[in-house]
Amino acid sequence: MATSVKMDEETKEQLERLQAEIKLQTGKRVTQQELLTRLVEDAIESKEQLIDSFRDERVPVSKAEREAFHEGMISAGVETREEDIDDILYG
């Protein structure tokens, strides 16, 4: 079942340019539906990156930098309770 998707003129033109570039480089003609399907599939594969692109504030830290930061975390062997934090902060 096909359904229509509304988009502005600029987006439509970009989609058409992508179609033309695919045809030029691969010799294969793809429909806009095929192209949109592939774009959605690719977005699903990199879902975290897509979701991050919609955040208001972006922290320019790569995934490798985040992993390195978390690798440096160690456990002090003491479990801190919420009450302990309240006592330290508020007395």
Image: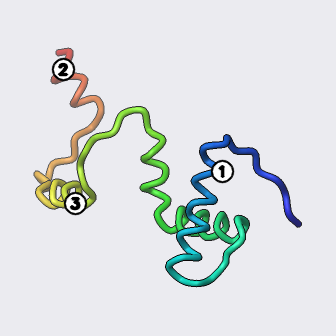
Judged by depth in the image, the label closer to the viewer, 1 or 3, is: 1
Q: Position of residue 16 (x, y in %)?
A: 63, 59
Residue at horizontal 66 percent and vertical 42 percent from the top: 9
Label 2 SS: helix
Q: Are marks 2 and 3 in contact (CB under 8 Å)?
A: no
The residue to which callout 1 is attached is 12
- Hey, which residue is sitting farthest front in the picture? 24
Cα separation, mark 2 vs mark 1, equals 56 Å
Q: Give left or right: position of 90 versus 82.
A: left
* Mark closer to the chain start, 2 or 1: 1
The residue to which callout 2 is attached is 89
Q: Position of residue 25 (x, y in %)?
A: 50, 79
Q: Position of residue 5 (x, y in %)?
A: 76, 50
Q: Position of residue 3 (x, y in %)?
A: 84, 57
Cα separation, mark 1 vs mark 3, equals 38 Å
Judged by depth in the image, the label closer to the viewer, 2 or 1, is: 1
* Mark closer to the chain start, 2 or 3: 3
Q: Is residue 72 above or below residue 57?
A: below
Q: Give left or right: position of 13 versus 71.
A: right
